[in-house]
């Protein structure tokens, strides 16, 4: 299976997609690494930890646990973990192995970024969402009361190890949550992936290994290319936010309780596609193709009782809003999007109403 390489301006790291790669984790620890701190959740470690524990057999390592919920994705648990690391012999030669879903990837990455002013992290994602998105590209963060991921840093990993076999026991809703990020990859940049998702929907949803491995590898390749070109989100990387501006507002409005992240992104992609068409960026037949793929990977949960006006107000607080201007990533056609800031607010509100309907 494929191995990719993020090649950013000042560093490079491997992103390996391979069944069973967890068993080779020790090989990817930086040379001369001291004590290894695996950061996981109790749940993930209980169900999936055995292969990693075996891989680290013979290395000085400790396992530390995070709470793993969006409400507790805060600075306080990281401070507690940092204290624990010092108590257990952590120093500047230590390395963090992040073993879990997106929350663990983000939090353990941030812990590595700030522990003793920065130690390496190896990302070993255990959910589909984290495999195709959160683990690649070096974004690390925790939430503030006022919003998601509002403190953090760019801390590129030493390596990313993506093992599709660990997804075998992933609950269906979590698997589908990751699929929405893969659908996003097809819409924004990968026409062949877009077509494959349309033609092989049944294989994908039945989790046939050839189909799952193919769509993971294609999404990972896309993300590796994008973050290699623009690690700090000055330009190209912004296309990855397709569906996310509205999606984040929806997650905040529902207090992370009603929707998984991918579902919120799917609603966001519906809104952005409607907006792209009505604002004149995307021809109707292309918008129809995008809506059809989103429909194919549904159904999405009902969104009754959510106020379009409140969502509109929340958009303004998104961290992608710059100097009061909301930036939308809108489709131009399948495989191409544009970042747009001048959009009529009345049209944005209508797009929200459409997505909620
Ligand atoms: N999840 C979007 C990014 O990594 O930029």
Image: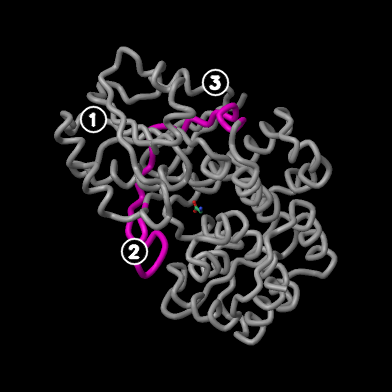
Element at badge 2?
strand
**Residue at point 68% right, 65% down?**
302
**Residue at point 43% right, 68% down?**
319
Q: Nearer the viewer, residue 271 or 340?
A: 271
Question: Which of pointers 2 and 3 lies earlier in the amino acid sequence?
Answer: 3
Structural crowding at the residue carrying mark 3, measured as other residues with C-alpha within 10 Å and reported as few (<14), some (14–19) or many (≥20)? some
Q: Is residue 154 left or right of residue 328?
A: left
**Residue at point 74% right, 77% down?**
280
Question: Which of pointers 2 and 1 lies earlier in the amino acid sequence?
Answer: 1
Q: In this view, does 168 lie above or below 188?
A: above
**Residue at point 52% right, 67% down?**
254
Element at badge 1?
loop
| Mark 2 or 1: the one toward you | 2
Outermost residue toward the top in this view: 58
Tag 1 and tag 3, C-beta contact below 8 Å: no
> Residue under circle 2?
144
User: Any magenta on residue 134?
Assistant: no
> How many marks can you see?
3
User: Magenta segment range?
Assistant: 141-168
User: Any magenta on residue 148?
Assistant: yes
> Residue under circle 3?
20
Structural crowding at the residue carrying mark 2, measured as other residues with C-alpha within 10 Å and reported as few (<14), some (14–19) or many (≥20)? some
The CA span between labels 2 and 3 is: 36 Å
> Residue under circle 1?
94
Q: In this view, does 298 lie to the left or right of 46?
A: right
């Amino acid at each position: 299976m494929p191995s990719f390489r993020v090649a950013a301006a000042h560093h490079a790291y491997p992103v390996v997609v391979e069944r069973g790669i967890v068993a080779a984790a020790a090989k990817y620890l930086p040379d001369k690494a001291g004590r290894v701190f695996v950061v996981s959740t109790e749940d993930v470690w209980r169900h999936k930890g055995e292969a990693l524990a075996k891989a680290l057999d013979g290395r000085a390592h400790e396992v530390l646990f995070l709470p793993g919920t969006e409400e507790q994705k805060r600075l306080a648990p990281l401070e507690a973990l940092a204290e624990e690391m010092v108590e257990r012999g952590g120093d500047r030669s230590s390395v963090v192995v992040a073993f879990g879903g997106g929350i663990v990837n983000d939090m353990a990455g941030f812990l590595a970024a700030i522990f003793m002013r920065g130690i390496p992290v190896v990302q070993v994602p255990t959910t589909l969402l984290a495999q195709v998105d959160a683990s690649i590209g070096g974004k690390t963060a925790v939430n503030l009361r006022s919003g998601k991921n509002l403190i953090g840093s760019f801390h590129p990993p030493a390596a990313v190890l993506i093992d599709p076999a660990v997804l075998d026991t992933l609950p269906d809703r979590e698997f589908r949550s990751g699929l929405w990020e893969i659908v996003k990859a097809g819409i924004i940049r990968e026409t062949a992936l877009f077509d494959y998702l349309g033609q092989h929907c049944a294989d994908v949803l039945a989790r046939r290994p050839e189909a799952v491995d193919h769509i993971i590898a294609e999404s990972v390749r896309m993300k590796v290319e994008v973050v290699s070109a623009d690690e700090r989100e000055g330009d190209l990387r912004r296309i990855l936010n397709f569906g996310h501006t509205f999606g984040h507002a929806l997650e905040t409005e529902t207090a992370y309780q009603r929707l998984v992240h991918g579902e919120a992104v799917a609603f966001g992609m519906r809104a952005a596609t409607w907006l792209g068409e009505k604002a004149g960026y995307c021809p109707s037949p292309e918008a129809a193709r995008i809506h059809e793929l989103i429909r194919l990977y549904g159904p999405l949960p009902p969104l009754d009782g959510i106020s379009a006006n409140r969502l509109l107000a929340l958009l303004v607080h998104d961290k992608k809003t710059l100097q009061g201007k909301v930036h939308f990533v809108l489709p131009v056609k399948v495989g191409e999007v544009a970042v747009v800031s001048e959009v009529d607010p009345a049209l944005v509100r209508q797009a929200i109403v459409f997505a909620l309907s």
